[in-house]
Image (tube, rainbow, N blue to C red):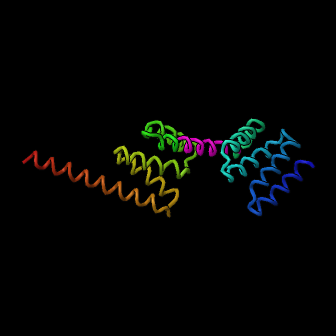
Amino acid sequence: MDGESCVKKAYEHILNSDFEQAIEWFEQAIAADPGNASYHYKCAISCSRSGKWSKAHRYAMLAVELDGSHPEYEFYLQTIEAKLDVIAAEQFIKAIPPLHAEALTLLRQAAEKDPLSFEAFFLMAMLYAEIGDLDAAAINAREAIRIDPGHSAARRLFADVNRKRRSLRDRIKERYRKRNR
């Protein structure tokens, strides 16, 4: 079967939300025409929809290598790399003890690669709040809300951080007033 016929079969499976079968058909299209960057790109999208991030990354990299003239291929590769950074950061967060600095480095990278990564900004906000950098926590929580205005946990985090910031400012003002009496 030729590559285009395989791609049509893959799209049939996508319409039925069967991404596993779609991946198999995209891989058959790639086998039929390994130099077709479009097939690699489409397969990367289906892999990411299935949560197969490493596989998606491999196909997205091949798409860019085969044809770097498509900015959407490069953009998608960066999006996948951002997701992989978030996944790696989550492992640092789950470590005992949590490795905050390492996680924050990866999350900053993820946010640079994908400025619309809600997960990166939300996790940064949570980590900054946890380590007591309330200003950075507020900035990142606000950005997470900008990306996903309806996310209730992000809204709660932003409100909690702002409440703590106000309380801290009030305590500092009170100490200053007592010292200057």
Residue at the left extreme of this rendering = 181
Residue pictured at 44% horizontal, 40% vertical: 96
Q: Is 150 situated above or below 112?
A: below
Residue pictured at 44% horizontal, 37% vertical: 101
Residue 118: percent from the left, percent from the top?
53, 52
Which span is picked out in magenta?
73-88
As drawn, is 150 to the left or to the right of 9?
left
As drawn, is 27 to the left or to the right of 179?
right
Query: Does the magenta-highlighted stretch encompass residue 52?
Result: no
Residue pictured at 74% horizontal, 35% vertical: 65
Residue at the front extreme of this rendering = 96
Residue 132: percent from the left, percent from the top?
34, 45
Query: Does the magenta-highlighted stretch encompass residue 86?
Result: yes
Residue 16: percent from the left, percent from the top?
77, 63
Residue 114: percent from the left, percent from the top?
58, 46
Residue at the right extreme of this rendering = 1
Q: How many marks?
A: 0
Prevailing SS of the magenta stretch: helix
Residue pictured at 72% horizontal, 47% vertical: 44
Q: Depth check: 140 or 52 in front?
A: 52
Q: Depth check: 13 or 135 in front?
A: 13
